[in-house]
């Protein structure tokens, strides 16, 4: 970032405020991922307002955040914003087209086959082609590697689950120090993070099989924390003193809509369990990052009302998602938090902090 900083009351701006890490965590949530994007758009539009008045090119999220991590829907968005370096407006357009293409036709409303095994409700080949189209439209070859060896200012990763070990795996656009990275194309990484059980078929990368990470990290804030530590922290150093701004964005309260279609057994309890774990993760995180929360360096944005009846695949509800997100942002308490968030981000001068490594 190349803009003037806001000086602190004591004179020169603090080093943390000008070069500290900015981290972005993005929840999963199907089509409600549009709510994530509307919230992020509000933040970026306000951040870019002074630049617009000076007729300067607007900053994109990849110009502001050092690390973007996401799960499922959030993983797709993390790839678009980080690896493909889209603006939020470009991402909204691409994501809207993708969900319409993918969720337009349902393969089956019956969740099980005659053997009692879960079967996908939507066509995984359509998801793959829709993702490849997004990649091509970004000017990147559809078979490009997620980690192509190029050092970028903004690092991005997605969460997925290894179906054999049942553990969270991070697929990355970079290779962190002393960590093994799964070799995957951008498309494979996007498919792996979004292969939600009952929605799409599992994804094979090499000899391993993956499904989406919502069951273990639908709110990936702790994964982002862990990844940032792996990248920038060595020996006995701590991550928190290096973080100037940590933003976590949800996809709204899902209510009970997703388990009203007669899905039996464990599938019937999945969505409320994920919703509970998502907010429980945030509470635990705030307890550990209390100082950042109090100093207005950690922000969690998540629409509380209005999205309860919007299902994961209801792509025709874009208007409802936008309206609920706008109503949430228009509330006085959220306006103040967005203002504090902008004030924090506006002092950032650069990304890719090699001197922390």
Image (spheres, helix red, strand yellow):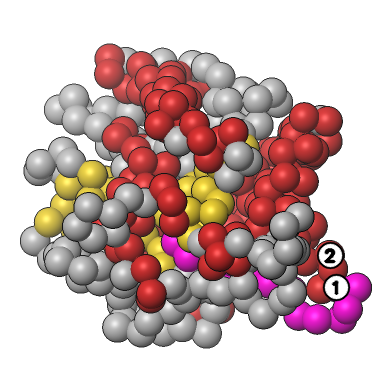
Q: Is residue 200 left or right of residue 177?
A: right
Against 143, residue 46 (above or below) is above
Residue, far front: 10
Q: Is residue 160 left or right of residue 88?
A: left
User: Where is residue 54 shown, x and y percent of the image?
Assistant: 88, 78
Magenta stretch in the rendered image: 52-67
In magenta segment, residue 55: yes
User: Where is residue 236 shown, x and y percent of the image?
Assistant: 22, 52
Q: Which mark is residue 49?
A: 2
In the picture of the structure, the residue carrying the numbered disc 1 is: 52
User: Where is residue 134 shown, x and y percent of the image?
Assistant: 52, 70
Q: Residue at x 37, y 47 (%)?
A: 225
Any part of residue 193 in sight: no
The reply to whether discs 2 and 1 touch (Cβ–Cβ < 8 Å) is: yes
Q: Which mark is residue 65?
A: none
Foreground residue, 67 or 121? 67
Q: Secondary structure at mark 2?
A: helix
Q: Is residue 225 left or right of residue 19?
A: left
């Amino acid at each position: 970032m190349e803009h003037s900083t806001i000086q602190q009351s004591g004179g020169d701006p603090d080093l943390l405020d000008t070069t500290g890490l900015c981290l972005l965590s993005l929840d999963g949530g199907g089509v409600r991922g549009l709510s994530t994007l509307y919230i992020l758009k509000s933040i970026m539009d306000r951040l870019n307002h002074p630049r617009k008045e000076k007729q300067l090119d607007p900053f994109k999220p990849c110009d502001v955040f050092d690390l973007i991590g996401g799960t499922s829907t959030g993983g797709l968005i993390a790839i678009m914003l980080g690896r493909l370096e889209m603006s939020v407006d470009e991402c909204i357009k691409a994501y809207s087209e993708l969900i319409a293409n993918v969720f337009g036709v349902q393969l089956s409303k019956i969740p099980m086959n005659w053997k009692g095994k879960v079967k996908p409700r939507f066509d995984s080949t359509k998801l793959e082609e829709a993702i490849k189209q997004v990649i091509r439209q970004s000017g990147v070859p559809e078979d490009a590697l997620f980690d192509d060896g190029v050092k970028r200012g903004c690092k991005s990763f997605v969460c997925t689950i290894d179906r054999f070990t049942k553990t969270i795996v991070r697929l990355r656009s970079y290779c962190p120090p002393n960590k093994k990275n799964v070799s995957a194309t951008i498309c494979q990484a996007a498919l792996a993070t979004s292969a939600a059980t009952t929605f799409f078929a599992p994804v094979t990368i090499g000899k391993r099989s993956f499904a989406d990470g919502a069951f273990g990290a639908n709110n990936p804030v702790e994964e982002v924390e862990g990844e940032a530590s792996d990248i920038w922290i060595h020996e006995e150093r701590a991550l928190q003193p290096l973080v100037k701004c940590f933003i976590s964005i949800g996809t709204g309260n899902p209510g009970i809509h997703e388990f009203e279609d007669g899905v039996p057994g464990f599938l019937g309890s999945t969505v409320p369990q994920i919703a509970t774990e998502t907010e429980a993760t945030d509470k635990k995180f705030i307890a550990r990052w209390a100082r950042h929360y109090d100093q207005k360096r950690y922000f969690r944005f998540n629409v509380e009302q209005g999205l309860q009846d919007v299902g994961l695949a209801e792509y025709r509800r874009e208007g409802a998602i936008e309206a609920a997100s706008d109503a949430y942002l228009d509330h006085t308490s959220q306006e103040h938090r967005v203002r504090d968030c902008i004030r924090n981000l506006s002092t950032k001068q650069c990304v890719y902090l090699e001197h922390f490594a």
